[in-house]
Amino acid sequence: MLEFKNVNKIFGPVKALSDINFNVKKGEIVGLVGENGAGKSTLMKIIFGAYQADSGIILIDGRQTQFTSPRDAMQNGIGMVFQEQSLIGNLSVMENIFLGRENEFKRFGIINFKEMEAAAKYQLGKVGLEIDPRTQTFDLSFAQRQLVELAKVLTLEERTQNDLVILLDEPTSVLAEDEVKLLFKLVNQLRDRAAFIFVSHRLDEVITLSDRIYVLKDGEVVDEVDASIAKPENIQSAMVGREIDSGYYKQDERKDFDASSVILNVEKVSVRSKLENISLKLRKDEVLCLVGTEGSGREAILRSVFGMETPDEGYINYFEDGSLSIRSPFDAVSNGVGYMPRERKIEGIFSSMDVTENMTSSQLENYNRFGFLQQNAERKLAREWVDRLSIKTPSIAADCGRLSGGNQQKVVLAKWRSSGAKLMMLDHPTRGLDIGAKQDVYGMIREMSAAGIGLIVVPDTFEEAIGLAHTIIVMKDGKIMNVFDTATQQVTPFDLVSAMT
């Protein structure tokens, strides 16, 4: 269906893709993996028509072509489900599905919304999503929005003569395990309608879902593997060009914490429909991981501690004297509480501001002199942290929204670390990051813990929780189901699953 032959793409002095040979057969699911900067995004953008190849041949159904735009690609049956999602939150589901195609439902210049609603129901039926098409998209869960994205792509069936090729960019990055299983089941059911290119940093999922896997490194295809015989450790080695250190989560750097130095005391906190009678303590140096499915209450705890949710019952005391009261995110930031949200592009960074501005956004009072910002001091701090965290950016004046996901995550970490936060909350801090970037984040977590910072982490996987945490709290339906001490207990993923059920 789709084939690349010796495709190259150059940006100035940088060769982003070098002699790429790649193909997708009808009904096939092809995995695409590689570290951030390996060329995955560039390859996807060429397939989707956002970039044009500088040389080489691209074939669709044996016919040579090169798409001039995403619209051109879509008219030829190429669709994309984006990692950060492309839906507009304050529009309804049906308006998002048919965004840019409203003329199809116009009669005498007026949109027939009943007709649009019926058409949207048909598309949502393809992905098994039973919701009111008039629902505002903001009100959906992340998993539901992901299915709306897929339904939107499947509208191409009625608009093209070609079979579909659907690009899935990190579609499982924040889905719970049961939601991932449902997505995989749906993708397999759609094989008779479409072929898929599946991009993910979760190698176990790539191996499970894919038929074949391409490994990219430094803009080149360095391996092509039959998924039936693929092993995560071999793929990891091909991605990074070396054997992966057995201390992946830097367990050897995990130090004991001071059990007597409580910096957060959550006592019998309840939030209507989200949390029920939650009590927990966090100490200096401690890494506490919250484990559970979507809606289990993990995020509600973080948002309550950060002043974004107001408990209906109970209380939250901060730091060792327990006298601090936080009623808003402003209070939290002012008193040394940091929060890295899951959706970094929406809540974590200011995408239209540069790297320097993002790093100092939580501590502007430190750079204020007689009402003027000390920009030289701001730039000095930004350069220090870019070097310290190996942030890949053209310059500290680069637009933060244009950095890779891993480098955006490092900018957010630098923002809080440099501001002197004493309590840090990290919601899926390694979401969508490659192996190298994940290890950088793990190193930063260890460094913060060693510096006396208490951390609450919502991890990406059970293995990540076990590898990082001193303490693991398992949650379900807004309640604490079990607590594990990794220093005294041998914890396995099965233990965590059993506690959740």
Image (cartoon, rainbow, N blue to C red):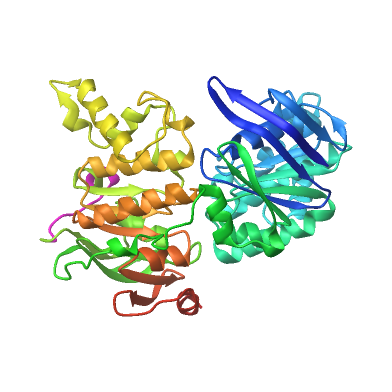
Q: Per the image, is 89 magenta? A: no
Residue beneath the point at 26% across and 25% down: 379
Q: Tag count in the figure?
A: 0
Quick check: can you spot residue 296? no
Q: Considering depth in this image, is 273 or 140 the residue closer to the camera? A: 140
Quick check: can you spot residue 302? yes
Task: Quarter of the image for the N terminus: give it.
Answer: top right
Question: Residue 467: image x %, image y %?
Answer: 39, 65
Single out the residue that lies furthest toward the front.
242
Question: Residue 118: image x %, image y %?
Answer: 78, 46
Residue 50 versus residue 419 in the image, above or below: above
The quadrant holding residue 70 is top right
Q: Considering depth in this image, is 87 or 381 the residue closer to the camera? A: 381
Q: Considering depth in this image, is 386 or 345 the residue closer to the camera? A: 386
Residue beneath the point at 49% across and 51% down: 242
Question: Residue 263: image x %, image y %?
Answer: 18, 61
Is 415 on the left or on the right of 66, as rendered?
Answer: left
Residue beneath the point at 46% across and 57% down: 244
Residue 22 versus residue 208 in the image, above or below: above
Residue 399 versus residue 37 in the image, above or below: above
Magenta span dominant secondary structure: loop
* Residue range highlighted in magenta: 322-331
Q: Per the image, is 328 magenta? A: yes
The quadrant holding residue 157 is top right
Residue 165 versus residue 232 in the image, above or below: above
Question: Residue 133: image x %, image y %?
Answer: 68, 48
Is 299 on the left or on the right of 54, as rendered?
Answer: left
Single out the residue that lies furthest toward the left.
321
